[in-house]
Image (tube, grey):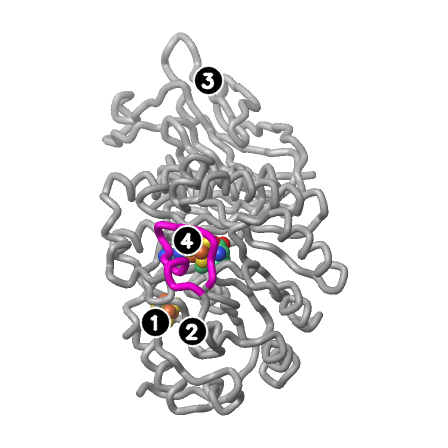
Amino acid sequence: MGAIEPSDTAPKDLGLAVILTYGCNSRCSHCHIWQRGPLGNELSLRQYREIFQGDFAQQVTSLSISGGEPFTRADAEAVLRSVPQNIPLLVGTNAIEDERIARCLDRIRATRPISVQVSVDGTAETHDRVRGVAGNHDAAVRLLKWCQREGIPSTVSFTLGADNYADLLAVQSLAGQLDAHFAFRPVNRGEFYGNQDGHFAPSDFAEAQIQTVEQDVTALIKQKMREGYYNQTDFVYWGLIPDYLRGTVKYPRCLAAKDFFLIDPAGVLYPCPQYWQPMGNVHDWPEAFMSPRRLEVAAKVERLECGGCWNDCFIWNSLCRQPQWVRTQFARILHERIGVPQQAPSEILPGEDSAVACLGQGWFPSDSPGARWTSLEAALFISGGSMLHVTLSNPCPQRQSAPTQLEVEVDGNPSATVPLDFQGERTLDIEMPRKSENTIREVLLKCDRTWTPASLGLSKDSRKLGVAVIRVWTTQ
Ligand SMILES: C[S@@+](CC[C@H](N)C(=O)[O-])C[C@H]1O[C@@H](n2cnc3c(N)ncnc32)[C@H](O)[C@@H]1O
Ligand code: SF4
Ligand code: SF4
């Protein structure tokens, strides 16, 4: 057994996934819970009430209720209503019975806040094929539209497999149209899902498919940065999915069995859906938490004896509690996927009331301190303000008939075109569409041609340079 830390013996700030039932009305290919059916000894409504009102719930700070399909239980609504007001509650559903579910949610939200996670595993044809139920996509969209109209917070949940990965960005865009949060994860293996035989191993993905996933998650991260959604935990979780699929992911410390638990329909505590190690029963709380068995499983998880996984309900939550790990991985993703040079940002000085978030692809160091050369095209991400200012230096005007043209694009929109027909420094002031604070914008500096100091006999430097940038900043 590994070293037991003080928090191992003090339950607090717990995340819980409560599996209400293994009953399910779907026919999914990536999850075989539907083949199992409800357990004979499911906890009753009275037992759930006792649990939610007992000591156990005092330490719970996030609760997701799921299944199986939770709404196949006749008393699902009553169970959801029995969760104390102070515990944030998320219910996950396949939305097959969307109208009945909407009626339940309507009554529940009159008594307590609730948010809803609806599975959408592709565009209509893909989703209905992957889930084996004709018309399920339409029902899911209807329920999400209802949530949008009624102001109920919703999440579109996409499980990415080798048979639907190509629809990732289409589903993400659908989530945007429905004002829903977007969550996705690769298909994981586990006894819980009934696919532990390895049929759905990450190795199902061919390298070409993984490369498509990598391009898509990179595009998504860049899009989110531009929109001002700057959540490093999401970016790292998404960004490492291709590594998981290749089997090269570096796993973070997992806090399952310590800070996160799954409770099966009979009340048995497990660390997570993949590592199917029973640890006691929720009725035996707090003894089950303090038990040697729970500590033994937590220590095994710590040593990754589970084999690791990339399931958001546990890994994403574990990441939230390890910001330093996230920062290190984020820097790596920026460097390897977005092309940000590892030590570049400080070389272009931010203005006083703004900040250069980071440089993207296409930069060269310069001999002049505090400046950088662009190549033909150079990207940077910058936050704040409605005016963009770029101080350029053109120490070597081209000895050609027409000056180089510099085009500045903000978030993909051409915003200025400037002839580099001057010597020395010049500051460009470019108006940007006003956006909310902390919005990250992608700025592209595009020259119509490059030059090399070597070709002009100035030095042996053969780098293809665009223009030297001294400073970039924004103002209101
Ligand atoms: C088990 S389902 C339960 C709720 C509901 N029946 C549904 O489908 O949304 C919860 C989430 O797990 C996802 N899921 C299913 N099989 C999975 C697997 N093998 N790996 C990771 N997530 C999976 C589903 O797509 C869904 O978003
Ligand atoms: S993913 Fe949800 S709907 Fe599909 S089989 Fe599993 S529990 Fe049922
Ligand atoms: S790494 Fe994954 S499989 Fe292992 S305990 Fe954590 S959540 Fe479970």
Q: Amino acid at mark 3?
A: Gln
**Residue 462: x, y in percent?**
25, 29
Q: Are marks 2 and 1 in contact (CB under 8 Å)?
A: yes
User: Label 2, label 4: how many angstroms apart (C-alpha)?
Assistant: 17 Å
Q: Magenta: predominant secondary structure element?
A: loop
Viewer-side residue, 386 vs 214: 214
What is the span of residues highlighted in magenta in the rendered image?
23-37
Q: Secondary structure at mark 3?
A: strand
Camera-near label (3 vs 4) is 4
The residue singled out by tag 1 in the image is: 275
Q: Earlier in the sequence, mark 2 or mark 1?
A: 2
The residue singled out by tag 4 in the image is: 185
The residue singled out by tag 2 in the image is: 256
Q: Which residue is at a point 50% across and 39% down the rendered structure image?
A: 135
Q: Quadrant of the C terminus?
A: top right
Camera-near label (2 vs 1) is 1
Q: Residues within 10 Å of mark 3 (few under 14, many from 20)?
A: some
Q: Which residue is at a point 62% across and 66% down the rendered structure image?
A: 75
Residue 233 seen in render: no
Q: Which residue is at a point 29% across and 44% down the rendered structure image?
A: 210
User: Label 2, label 1: how many angstroms apart (C-alpha)?
Assistant: 9 Å
The residue singled out by tag 3 in the image is: 405
